[in-house]
Image: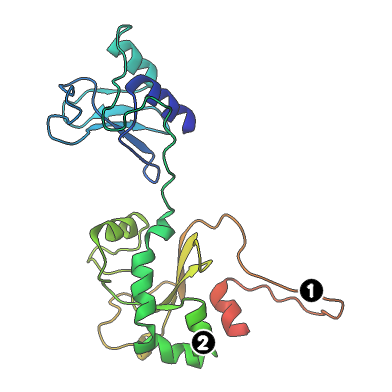
Amino acid sequence: MENILSAAVEILGQAVRVERHRDWAIFWCPFHNDASRAGEGGHPNFGVNLVNGYWKCLRCGATGGSLNALRIRLGQDWKPPVSELVGTTAPMHPHKPPSQAKMLDEAMSEARSIVQRSPAWSYLAQRGVLPYTALVYGLGYGIPIPRVHREIIEAATQSLMVRRDGTWSWAGGVVYADPPTQPTVMNVRYIPQEQLPKGTRRFKPEKNHKTWGVRMQPLGSWRITQVTRTLIVLEGLFDMLITA
């Protein structure tokens, strides 16, 4: 990915933005009138796929299957423009965007803010999770349609957390990020249907829990001493809390 991005920057100049969660880098198109650095529509339209080098302009339709093909089409006399907006020709090192789980912070914050006034509060008490523990570890309650910005909804949609009817798949459950800070995954532990207000969850979960994101390493904690006789392996943060 980095090699393709570096090669694209060498050909086209500075990227306007890099969308790593989609594996695309966006540039000003070299094929239609872009001398003003504003593009015909006021927005950059030329994208390069950072996985395979495929490129395409959504405005003029220029397209190709590799960066080598792009070099050939532009010709030997082509030189990348120097952006007046950044005022530098230094190599670009774009900031790596947050993970999909991290992008859902706004939705997670809302879930945490309402947990004490939700069915999750009594459910957690039944499972032996103390109020202090629930707040410290950031447990929340998933409502069907969180009141969040559009980009958060788009991030949730890309993570397959939004159903076709627009409701979120964590509806009617205890939701939590794992780990609580700098999360890599989002989780829901579904509250039994009979403990929810009517109409809260309009689907039947396949399991009592669901996870979104990619676990790169086991999550949890343990302690072994000389007197340890039994080691219990728990599935995740929620099981660790109710066992403790």
What residue is drawn where x is 87% and y is 77%? 226
Q: Earlier in the sequence, mark 1 or mark 2?
A: 2
Q: Which residue is mark 1?
A: 224
User: Which residue is located at x 33 percent, y 56 percent?
Assistant: 155
Give coordinates of residue 166: x percent, y percent.
Answer: 23, 66
Most extreme residue toward the front, as rendered? 87
Question: Residue at 28% of width from left, 71% of height from top?
Answer: 146
x, y percentage for residue 74? 28, 13
Secondary structure found at label 2? helix
Q: State the image quarter where residue 71 is shown.
A: top left
Residue where numbered disc 2 is placed: 132
Image point (51%, 65%), residue name: 181
Identify which amino acid the numbered label 1 is placed on: Ile
- Give percent across and percent down for residue 195: 37, 90
Mark pair 1, 2: CA separation: 26 Å
Farthest residue, direction top:
76
